Image: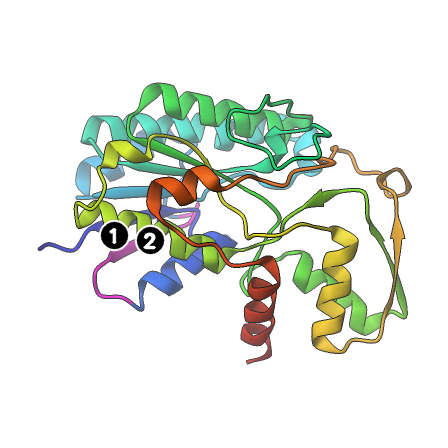
């Protein structure tokens, strides 16, 4: 059986690098990672040319404008990547009949429900980043089938810049830190998300599930619940860093773009459809810290 060729856009991001790293360990995939300098998805002619000249079986779109606060001052650029770029990929995948897996965000929600959010919950994006990500989702789903939207949250990795690395850096250089405690969600170790995506693709390749079964919106984060304050405490406890962390409210740490106050994601749909088990967020943190230590 021919190995499926996977295209990963936004390959320099945290998830993109995890996909490339993990897929490289297994012979059943041939993976191609392209960053923005190699394929700018905001340029339709570049996307069309690449897809017409290359034999791709799956497309995983990790490319995104993710500078949440900066997006407030760069709405055109966020629109070009998060909306127009997704449109270009969806159309190209539609012409070539290629399944598209597109990564999105918990920022599309902004509710105060005390229960984990299901995929059909009302969306209420606040700010440019959140609004463009939701618009990109809707366009992809309308233009192409099968298209899998994976909304995730609080992503971190041993690659790239993220909350874990920031806390490690600040914790080693300061005696105390203030971290918000009224934003509740779940950290997601990008490697676990990458593994889940590759398992789903492998099951399609082996015809254990149909490509059509992935169409729609799914949630993936690690299991469990915490605040950013709790997350920081766990990072320092696991690494032995002696830094006092004080809980503060979001109003005491204002940012240009609003963050979701509660974005714990319900993952039952994904687990039921694909038979996946999801590790607790503390397991992901331990694995990531061990990776960084090495």
Of the pair 218 and 8, the residue shown nearer to us: 218
Q: Which residue is mark 2?
A: 198
Circle 2 crowding by C-alpha within 10 Å: few under 14, some 14–19, many from 20 = some
In this picture, residue 51 sits left or right of residue 36: left
Q: Is residue 12 visible?
A: no
Asked if disc 2 and disc 1 are in contact, CB closer than 8 Å, the reply is yes
In this picture, residue 202 sits left or right of residue 78: left
Region rendered in magenta? 26-37
Is residue 282 one of those drawn in magenta?
A: no
Q: Residue at (46%, 27%) from the top-left corner?
A: 137
Of the pair 151 and 40, the residue shown nearer to us: 151
The outermost residue toward the left is 1
Q: Quadrant of the C terminus?
A: bottom right
Q: Is residue 243 visible?
A: yes
Q: Secondary structure at mark 2?
A: helix
Q: Residue at (64%, 22%) from the top-left corner?
A: 124
Q: Secondary structure at mark 1?
A: helix
Q: Which mark is residue 8?
A: none
Q: Position of residue 164 (x, y in %)?
A: 67, 61
Q: Which residue is mark 1?
A: 202
Circle 1 crowding by C-alpha within 10 Å: few under 14, some 14–19, many from 20 = some
Q: Residue at (31%, 69%) from the top-left corner?
A: 25
Res 157 quadrant in image: bottom right
Res 138 quadrant in image: top left
Q: Quadrant of the N terminus?
A: bottom left
In this picture, residue 53 sits left or right of residue 139: left
Q: What is the basis of the colouring in this image?
A: rainbow
């Amino acid at each position: 059986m021919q190995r499926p060729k996977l295209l990963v856009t936004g390959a320099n991001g945290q998830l993109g690098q995890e996909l490339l790293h993990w897929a490289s360990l297994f012979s059943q995939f041939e993976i191609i990672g392209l960053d923005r300098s190699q394929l700018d998805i905001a340029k339709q002619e570049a996307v069309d040319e690449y897809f017409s000249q290359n034999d791709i079986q799956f497309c995983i779109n990790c490319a995104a404008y993710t500078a949440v606060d900066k997006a407030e001052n760069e709405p055109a650029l966020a629109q070009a990547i998060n909306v127009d770029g997704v449109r270009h990929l969806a159309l190209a995948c539609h012409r070539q009949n290629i399944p598209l897996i597109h990564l999105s965000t918990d920022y599309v929600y902004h509710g105060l429900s005390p229960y984990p959010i299901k995929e059909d919950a009302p969306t209420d994006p606040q700010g440019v980043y959140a609004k463009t990500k939701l618009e990109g989702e809707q366009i992809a789903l309308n233009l192409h089938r099968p298209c899998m939207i994976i909304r995730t949250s609080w992503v971190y990795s041993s690659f790239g810049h993220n909350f874990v690395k920031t806390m490690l850096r600040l914790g080693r250089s300061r005696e105390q830190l203030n971290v918000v405690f009224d934003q509740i969600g779940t950290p997601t170790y990008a490697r676990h998300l990458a593994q889940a995506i590759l398992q789903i693709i492998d099951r399609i390749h082996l015809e254990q599930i149909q490509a059509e079964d992935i169409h729609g919106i799914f949630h993936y984060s690690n299991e469990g619940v915490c605040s950013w304050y709790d997350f920081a405490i766990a990072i320092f406890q696991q690494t032995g860093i002696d830094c006092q962390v004080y809980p503060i409210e979001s109003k005491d740490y204002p940012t240009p773009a609003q963050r979701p106050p509660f974005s714990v994601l319900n993952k039952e749909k994904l687990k039921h459809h694909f038979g996946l088990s999801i590790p607790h967020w503390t397991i992901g943190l331990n694995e990531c810290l061990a990776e960084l230590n090495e």
